[in-house]
Structures are given as structure tokens and as C-alpha cells.
Amino acid sequence: MKRAALLLRCSTDAQDYERQKLDLLDTIKGMGYTTSDDLVFGQYITGKDDVRKKDRESVAECKQAVREGKVDAIFINEVSRLSRDSIAGRLFIREFNDEYKIPVYFRDLGMWTINPTTRIVDRSFETMLGFHFDMAQNELKSMKTRFASGKRKNAREGKTIGGAVPFGFYKDEDGKLQVDEEQAQVVRLVYNKYLEDGGSIPSVCRYLLSCGYDKKFNKKFGTGSVRNLLRERRYIGEQRYNLVNPDEPDEAKKQEVYIYKVDAIIDTTIYNKVQIKLDKNRTTETKKVNKDKKIHLLAKLITCPICGDSYTSKTASANKSGERYRIWNYCCVSKYNFSECTSDITLNADNIESIIWQLTKREILALQELSLEERQSKIDEAEQKLASYKDELDVIAKSIDKLNVKKKKLVALFLDIEDDDTAIFNEQREAINKEIDSYNNRIQFLNTEITICEGNIARFKESDFTDEVLDKIEQDLLKKKELIKEYIKVIRPYRLTKARLILEVESKQTNYCILFEPRNSKRRCWYIQSSLAQWQNGLLKTSTAPLGNFFYIPMASLLLDEPDDLDAIASFEDMKEICRINNYVIEY
């Protein structure tokens, strides 16, 4: 039976999403098509940011399924569900008509772009679709003018113009900011604590968390949010809006500034003292960073498996034999910023960087052992991906310049509107955000993948990566960092006990688990490829074995003296011995 892909436009309304899906399922069933969950693109996710992100990915995922030969036709509920931008919509249809030659069916119009039987492109319908995209874009422009006018009207009346209400205020029935006295007391406390001797943003964060204000007000008081509180000018009674009039032909007059007064929470004198201290501390921090010039080899490569944020490098003072010195550690940035992340793992930078470098060198030297045929096969595979990515860039390059111009002219659409218009407003805002962001995100992704492919091709062709060459690279920290990033994708640390960690390492070639004992006096760790054994409490675990703090070995005969048809379970200590026997040991 022929396979259909469903392309749904995500909505903040889950019922609307399900309605689209059910309507299209009935349609494909009546036309003799079938589908599966992996061919339904545009999964609903709650929360506007995640919704937009998922919706942007849906078209790219659909294209990938088409390239992999999984799709015979694409079904879309309405023209507007594909695009409200005339260029983007036309490019999509042209791409599927001329490049992929995959029929697209629009349920609201009851028409195919390509006759699924004769495989003939319906050029008249392609032109007609262009008119529909034009109409959607014109509707968007008129809505933009209407909303921009409404925003200027609200600004003149001293009302808020959308966006988050700053902590310490609430919005009354007229849309104006009023002081929330309970929250305002915390704002004043933040300013006073920061101005105390020895007061700093981290010390203020710790104080707020110790008092339980994060739970009381359901607000994360991290370093970033506290810094924003200390910079907020609305606390001294000044509300400022910079708005753009989209109908003003004179560029010099497009920008309109509106300033109005709100009730102050902080005295201007105190506010100015805080600004002076913030600026002074910022200058001092900048000087420290420039003076240090520390190169962190694993910056943005270590990811917290609990909260998903990156690990950041921080210093700690130490004292050995009466001499003070600094130690660099990697720790979760969310944990450092006093969020609710429960990670307690701190990695000594010198140790973990040395381990990952040793693993990277083994990856590189392993490539030198590939036969010419194996190398050529990997080169062909990478070149096919590279050509596919570049072709996709060519398709969207024609529209990116115009989209960038459009992006500069767009007016922020966060506006207080009547309840009856909320759905229309949300729909138009989502459409604009989607069209602007989807191309930029896709281009960024494609450029990253192109860099990876080009790097892989170069590595497979490279023949002079000897120990001597690597030793020379080792002396240049910048080259060493670049080489590590070429091979290593992500590192995830897990705590097994206080003295034992598991490091999951995803590289461009294969994945590893590193058995790491930070207190090991012999400075030795052990590693195993995930194809040979999987730690069953991490992201790289296998779904065919039970979960737990142990390793699953799917084919024990590859590592142990066991019959071919047996698998095995190994503890941390067992796996250490297996790695030792097979010489999977790193000394750092």
C-alpha cells in the first residue's frame, strides 16, 4: 500500500492539532494510502517556544523522510497550514514538484500538485497555489498594520504592550502596571543586599533561595534573572517603548519612542548606586578573564544529563605545600546559577580534558588502519550527504535575503487585544515567527552538517596523522581544541557512587562509555565502545535489556571466553577487569 506523510501545522490548541490529524487520516484512508507515527510531522508540544521549535522542524523532517524513500505522497489540511509567506510556499511546492517529484494533496482545495497516477505536474495548480500564498501574506500585512496601530494607541495611554510583566508589578484591568507590594518588598531586598559590603549577584541568589522566595513566587532567582532585576528601569518609575510604524515611508521617522511613568519601587539614588557597582564589577570580571587566557578544550561539549544544560568552566582556589594556586573545574551551568538542577558532579578540567584527548587520539589513529576500500566507502557516504545538504541550501538561498529584509521591518506583535481576536492574533504571530525562524535555523543546521561532512571527508583522506603529528598538535591548545570538536559530539557524566562516574561520549565515529574514578591515584580510567557494551542507566542504553547501574554485553564472546549465543551483565568492577584484559585503558 502507498505511504502518506501528514504535514500538520502545530497550534497552541491541542484540539485543533488533533482535528487536522483526524481529518487527514480519513482522507488518506479513502484514497488508499496508509501512514505511521513516524510519518506524521508537526507533533503538538505545550508551550509556545517548544511549539514553534517543533513546527519549524516538521518540514525538515518531512523532507528527510522523502529523501530516504519512505513517502509516496504528502497530505496537508489547508494551504495556510503550509506557509503564509509567498516565497517560502512557492519554494516548497517547486522543490517537491521538480526535485523530489512527490505529489502533495491539499485537502481544503481537493487538488494534487502532481497527478499520483500519471505523475504529471499540474502547473496551473502550482500557479494557483502561488495566489493563495500571496493572499495569506497580504492578510498578514494588514494584520501587522492593525496591531501596530493598536500598540501605539496603548503606548500613548500608558498601557503595557505585551511581553512579561516585570517581577514586582501586575497588570490591572486597564492594562496598566501596578505595584505588587509583596513582590516589591523582595525587589527592594535584592537591591539592598547587593549594595551590602561583599554583596554580589551570586550572594543575593543564595540568600533568596535560602529564604525560599523561589518556591513562594514560583520564580527561578538565578544570576541572570537577578542581574535583570538590578538593571530594570521600570523600578524607578520609567516605562519606555520603542515602536516601529510599518506604514511610515520615511525610514528616519519609522522609530517612535513612548515614555510614561509608573509607580516607582526603588529610589533613584539607590538604583544609580547599583548601576555603578554593576559596571565596576563587570569591568573587573572582564579584566580577570582577559588576564587568564585559559583555553577550555571541552567548552560546550559536556552536557548535564539531568537538566540538559551545558557544563561551564569555573575556578576554585587550592593550597598545596603552603602555595596557593587555581583549579579549573567543569560544572553544570544551571547548578552554578542556583537553579533546581540536582547535579552534584564537578569534573577536574585537567583530568577530563586529558582523558578526552587520549580518546580522540585513539579515534584518529584507528582511522589510519582502515583499508582503501573502507575509506572510500565512508568518503562516498559523506559526499552524498554533503551534496544533499548543499542542494537544500541552494533551494532556500533565493528567499533568505528577502526574508531578512522582512525580519527587520516586522513589528513585534505582542499586543493587548480583544478576546475575540486572540485566536487570529496567535495564528498570525505564529505564522510570522515560523517563516522567519525556520529558514535561519535550517541554514544553521545545514552549515553545521556541511562542516562535519567536509571534516569527515578530509579525515578519511588524511594519511599523515601519525603519533608525531598528534604530538605537535598537542602543543597548540587551539588546534587541539579544534581537533577534539571535530571528533567529539557530546559528553554526559553520570554519578554511580561518590568515587565512581560513568562518562557517555558520543563521537563522530562511534560511542563510548568511560569508567572514571576521580580519586584513582594511578590516574587511570577504562573505556568500552557502546557497540560492545551499554551502561543501562544512561542515554545510550539498549531497550532490549533491563535497566540498572550495570553494563549489558549483547555478545559476550567478543570480550570474554563465552559461547557466541550468550549475552552478559557486568558490574562497574567487572567491566573494569574486562577493559583491562582487552587493553581498553587510558592513562592521563
Image (spheres, rainbow, N blue to C red):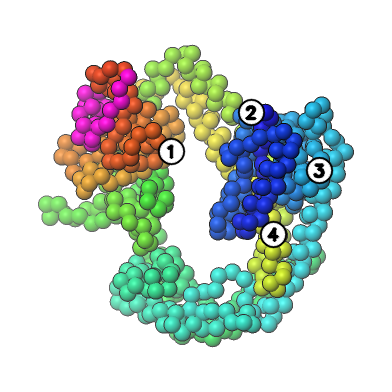
> Mark 4 falls on what kind of element?
helix
Q: Quadrant of residue 582?
A: top left
The percent coordinates of residue 411 (x first, y second) are 69, 64
**For the point 33% across and 37% down, which residue is it?**
546
Residue 480 appears in the rendering: no
Mark 2–mark 1 distance (CA, rounded to whole Å)? 28 Å
Label 2, label 3: how far apart the Cα atoms are: 25 Å
Q: From the viewer's perspective, tell me whether residue 319 is left or right of residue 394.
A: left
Callout 2–callout 1 Cβ contact below 8 Å: no
Give the x, y percent position of residue 35. 64, 36
Number of the label disc, if any, that sits on residue 427: 4
Q: Which residue is mark 1?
A: 489
> Which one is in front, 474 or 151?
151
Q: Nearer the viewer, mark 2 or mark 3?
A: 3
Do tag 3 and tag 1 residues touch (Cβ < 8 Å)? no
Q: Nearer the viewer, mark 3 or mark 1?
A: 3
Who's the residue at 50% across and 26% down the image?
458
Picture layout, residue 164 above or below residue 180: above
Circle 4 Cα neighbour tier, 10 Å, few/some/many (<14 / 14–19 / ≥20): few
Mark 1 or mark 2, which is nearer the start of the sequence? 2
Mark 4 or 3: the one toward you: 3
**3D distance between C-alphas at marks 4 and 2:** 33 Å
Q: Secondary structure at mark 2?
A: loop
Q: Residue at x 35, y 77 (%)?
A: 193
Q: Which residue is mark 2?
A: 69
* Mark positioned earlier in the residue sequence (1 or 4): 4
Mark carried by residue 110: 3
Q: Amino acid at mark 1?
A: Lys
The residues bearing labels 4 and 3 have C-alpha atoms spaced at a distance of 23 Å
